[in-house]
Image (cartoon, rainbow, N blue to C red):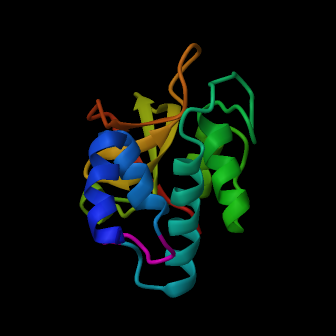
Amino acid sequence: MTMRVQMPHLLARAGTVSALTLITLAGPAPAPGMAAEPSLASVSAKALQIAASKEGSPYKWGAQGPDSFDCSGLTRYSYRRAGRTLPRTAAAQYRHTEHVSRSSRKGGDLVFFHSGSGVYHVGIYAGDDRIWHAPKAGTVVRLERIWSRSVWYGRVP
């Protein structure tokens, strides 16, 4: 059986989120919309792949991996494994990034949820208005649609 025959069957069985994970992890080529600079694109793409590979890992407050995560722990872990260092908290990570507009966001950018001027959550942008994140206690790392308009975007230098 060739990969062409197996892939549709595999994707049909895997479901949407798992299929997106398989596509994200499929290879080293950066996703459409990645930064033009090769080193930044490869770091962002690698961080995105690492976050996706943690799908199903349980949320645990203060956890930074490799088996459980809180929101900023997942982003920090993913970027550290990709070769960049991020501060520990979502708010500190926001201050550490180059802020970009919604129209300029790219796969691998960080998505910061805020209330007023305070950042309370972070995830990694996966494209198509979706993020990889560790939502809250009792959940697992997952791909989810951005549910709020109160978000800012940041690119890791």
- Residue for point 61% across, 47% down: 75
Magenta region, mostly helix, strand or loop? loop
135 with respect to 63 (left or right): left
Q: Dividing the image into 4 quarters, which one contains the C terminus?
A: bottom right
Measured as percent of width and height from the top left, residue 95 is found at: 59, 50
**Position in image of residue 142 (x %, y %):** 47, 35
The residue furthest front is 1
Residue 100 lies in the magenta-colored region: no
Q: Is residue 69 left or right of residue 135?
A: right
- The one of 79 and 58 positioned closer to us in this rendering: 58
Q: Relative to residue 16, is residue 98 drawn left or right? A: right
Which residue: 39% across, 73% down? 34
Residue 48 position, x and y percent, is 51, 58
Q: In the displayed structure, would residue 133 be above or below residue 129? A: above
Q: Residue at x 40, y 43 (%)?
A: 18
Left or right: residue 6 versus residue 139 is left
Span highlighted in magenta in the image: 27-33
Look at the image and tell me whether residue 156 can be seen. yes
The image quarter containing residue 151 is: top left
Residue at the farthest top position: 138
Which quadrant of the figure has residue 32? bottom left
Indicate the position of residue 109 as horizontal and vertical percent values: 46, 58
Residue 108 in view of the camera: no
Q: Nearer the viewer, residue 15 or 137?
A: 15
Residue at (35, 68) in percent of width and height: 1
Above or below residue 148? Residue 110 is below
The answer to which of 22 and 31 lies nearer the viewer is 22
Q: Is residue 101 above or below residue 132?
A: below
